[in-house]
């Protein structure tokens, strides 16, 4: 094994709208000042496969569930507000069944994590505390968790 683990230092987050519906974009726009992102776990539903003769319930695996949403915590600045306003506008103007993709890119990995998402309708109001960092949590709706695929480094344009 060549690496003991992967640091989150240098991770980039990006988004893109499909140019062809159903096809992963080839270029992602970087979102800056991302403070944290939620994980997406795949919880497996269970299906009751019991019959009348069973004294103890029998279960089989059903479909996986992502939980439906995850949060991205963003440092609140004029620049990040503009980025997210552009992202939301881009999503709203997508036509022809084109999806918005979200990527978490690790410089140390050949693959990145991809999810087809819907952004919030508008930027939510952040909470406040004393002597704290102003952040806002963007709740993204998961249309499809794509998972690991070939990484594409997000860029500023």
Image: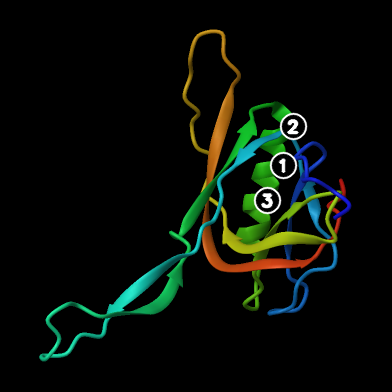
Q: In which quarter of the image is residue 52?
A: bottom left
Q: Which of marks 3 and 2 is nearer the N terminus?
A: 2
Q: Name the residue under label 1.
A: 83
Q: In this figure, which residue is indicated by the disc labeled 2? A: 79
Q: Determine the secondary structure under disc 1.
A: helix
**Going by the image, does 74 lie left or right of 54?**
right
Depth check: give the residue in front, 123 or 111. 111
* Residue 87: numbered disc: 3
Q: How far apart are marks 3 and 2 (CA)?
A: 12 Å
Mark 1 touches mark 2? (CB < 8 Å):
yes
Percent position (x, y) of residue 23? 74, 78
Please name the residue shown 63% across and 37% down the image: 36
Q: Which mark is residue 30?
A: none
Secondary structure beneath dot 2 equals helix
Q: Locate the N terminus and report the quarter of the image it occupies.
A: bottom right
Query: Dot 3: few (<14), some (14–19), or many (≥20) neighbours within 10 Å?
Result: many
| Residue 35 position in % (x across, y down) | 66, 33
- Pointers 1 and 3 in contact (C-beta within 8 Å): yes
Q: What is the C-alpha distance between the residues marked 1 and 3?
A: 6 Å
Seen at 48% across and 55% down, the residue is: 69
Nearer-the-camera pick, 72 or 56: 56
Q: How crowded is mark 1: few (under 14 residues within 10 Å), some or many (20 or more)?
A: some
Who is closer to the viewer here, 4 or 42?
Answer: 4
Q: Reply above or below: 153 against 45.
A: above
Q: Residue at x 77, y 40 (%)?
A: 7
Q: What residue is rendered at 69% in x and 26% in y?
A: 77
Percent coordinates x, y for residue 6 in the rendering: 78, 45
> Is residue 108 found left or right of 58 in the rendered image?
right
Q: Quadrant of residue 80?
A: top right
Q: Could you say where residue 120 lies in the image, as x and y percent from the top left?
A: 52, 50
Q: Is residue 117 above or below residue 51?
A: above
Above-or-below relation of 33 to 22:
above
């Amino acid at each position: 094994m060549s690496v003991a683990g992967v640091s989150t230092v240098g991770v980039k987050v990006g988004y893109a709208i499909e140019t062809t519906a159903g096809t992963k974009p080839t270029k992602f726009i970087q979102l800056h000042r991302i403070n944290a992102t939620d994980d997406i776990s795949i919880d497996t539903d269970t299906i009751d496969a019991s019959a009348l003769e069973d004294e103890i319930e029998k279960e089989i695996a059903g479909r996986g569930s992502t939980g439906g949403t995850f949060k991205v915590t963003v440092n609140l600045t004029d620049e990040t507000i503009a980025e997210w306003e552009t992202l939301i506008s881009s999503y709203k103007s997508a036509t022809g069944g084109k999806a918005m993709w979200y990527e978490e890119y690790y410089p140390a990995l050949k693959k990145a994590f991809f999810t087809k998402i819907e952004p919030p309708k508008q930027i939510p109001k952040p909470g406040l505390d004393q002597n704290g960092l102003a952040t806002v949590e963007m709740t993204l709706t998961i249309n499809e968790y794509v998972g690991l695929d070939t990484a594409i480094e997000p860029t500023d344009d």
